[in-house]
């Protein structure tokens, strides 16, 4: 079931709530694109069960039973889901929707009344559809996460299950360290890197016994045995270090933190202009991230030394010279 079905199409009026379209736009023209967009972008995040429930809500088949709070939550979820599917359907199938396939091959449709858009207009439109679609997915995930009373299936969907067992669990925790505007899409992109740096760096930094205690405590809080430091406080301190390292890996691998790349905005009397970051600017940003990660590592070790001294193993990257006996001197 789709979040927009034929019964609600209403000659394209439902779709025109989100993107201006002609009343002559047929359901047959858009059905395939809408289905592909939903299956490609929403279904992997929500899972089959929650996706079907959301589609029922969108098509009026799920009743809030007079609950005003549930009714308002349903309305917000409907708008976000339909916006995401419509915009991403148009963006991902932009070129194909302008063509038709006949026995004579692919043909471009033209009329005497309207002319095709200019290249810069098409580029701006595609970027707008992409941004609006992914922003709508962010909004939908935020609604589902915030209101699990009305959306109990969210806790078992792939987007939520990805976070279970992870030291870094929310977009807010990432935004407190590196600003991502609480983007769920970017957070999901960051999760594989967070798992990688956790396995490669965290145990070596804090020590295997303390790392094992942290992971065991996250599964069962009774297994956390350090009374002078709460499990949640220590998890967040470790998470800050992991976020710094994961951002560095993402920047090294892709050259950007988001799929839109790294941009710098300059302002003048003529308005704001954006330009892609140069290699030197990316390198400077990377160097700053590496310094921040090192500072976070030192801060984490100092935290362990203060609040969990029994597990402090020292800093292997720091050389301490003991000259209390005055046996070393400059010659």
Image (spheres, rainbow, N blue to C red):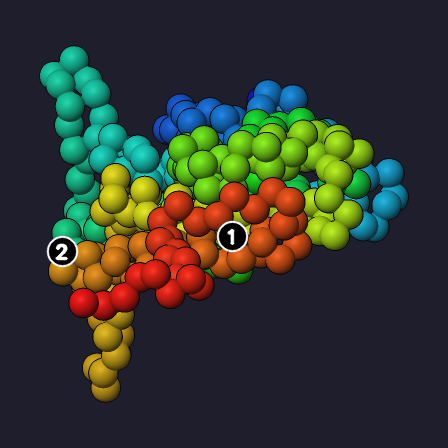
At x 44% / y 52%, what residue is drawn? 297
As drawn, is 112 to the left or to the right of 134? left
Where's residue 222, x and y in %? 80, 34
Q: Quadrant of the N terminus?
A: top right
Count of picture labels: 2
Question: Residue 279, which numbered label?
Answer: 2
Secondary structure, mark 2, is helix
Decide if residue 194 is in sight here: no
Residue 240, above or below 153: below
As drawn, is 265 to the left or to the right of 144? left
The tag earlier along the polypeptide, 2 or 1, is 2
Residue 89, above or below 320: above
Q: Nearer the viewer, residue 276 or 116?
A: 276
Residue 41 in which image quadrant: top left
Residue 200, above or below 250: above
Whole-number angstrom distance, CA of label 2 to CA of label 1: 33 Å
Where's residue 94, x and y in %? 28, 38
At x 83% / y 50%, what residue is drawn? 68
At x 60% / y 42%, what residue is drawn? 311
Residue 50 in which image quadrant: top right
Instruction: Tell me the residue that label 1 is attached to.
Output: 301
Q: Nearer the viewer, residue 109 or 211?
A: 211
Q: Nearer the viewer, mark 2 or mark 1?
A: 1
Q: Nearer the viewer, residue 317 or 20?
A: 317
Decide if residue 287 is in sight here: yes
Secondary structure, mark 1, is helix
Q: Specify few, some or many for label 1: CA neighbours under 10 Å numbering under 14, 14-19, or 20 or more.
A: many
């Amino acid at each position: 079931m789709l979040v927009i079905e034929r019964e609600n199409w209403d000659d394209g009026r439902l779709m025109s709530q989100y993107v201006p379209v002609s009343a002559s736009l047929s359901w047959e023209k858009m059905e395939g694109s809408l289905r592909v967009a939903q299956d490609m972008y929403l279904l992997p995040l929500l899972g089959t069960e929650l996706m079907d429930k959301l589609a029922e809500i969108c098509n009026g088949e799920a009743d809030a039973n007079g609950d005003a709070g549930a009714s308002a939550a349903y309305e917000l979820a409907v708008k976000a889901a339909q916006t995401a599917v419509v915009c991403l359907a148009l963006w991902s199938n932009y070129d194909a929707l302008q063509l038709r396939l006949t026995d004579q091959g692919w043909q471009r449709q033209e009329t005497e009344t309207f002319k095709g858009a200019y290249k810069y207009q098409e580029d701006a439109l595609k970027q707008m559809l992409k941004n609006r679609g992914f922003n709508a997915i962010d909004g939908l995930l935020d609604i589902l996460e915030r209101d699990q009373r009305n959306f109990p299936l969210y806790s078992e969907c792939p987007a939520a299950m990805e976070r279970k067992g992870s030291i870094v669990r929310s977009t807010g925790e990432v935004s407190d360290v590196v600003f991502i505007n609480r983007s769920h899409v970017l957070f999901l992109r960051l999760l594989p890197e967070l798992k990688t740096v956790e396995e490669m760096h965290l145990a070596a930094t804090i020590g295997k016994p303390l790392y094992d205690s942290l992971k065991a405590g996250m599964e069962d809080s009774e297994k956390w045995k350090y009374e002078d430091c709460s499990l949640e406080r220590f998890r967040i301190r470790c998470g800050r270090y992991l976020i710094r390292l994961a951002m560095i890996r993402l920047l090294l691998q892709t050259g950007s933190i988001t799929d839109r790349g790294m941009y710098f905005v300059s302002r003048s009397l003529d308005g704001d202009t954006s330009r892609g970051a140069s290699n030197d600017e990316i390198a400077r940003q990377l160097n700053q991230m590496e310094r921040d990660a090192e500072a976070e590592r030192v801060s984490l070790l100092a935290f362990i030394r203060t609040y969990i001294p029994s597990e402090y193993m020292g800093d292997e990257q720091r050389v301490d010279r003991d000259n209390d006996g005055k046996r070393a001197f400059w010659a």
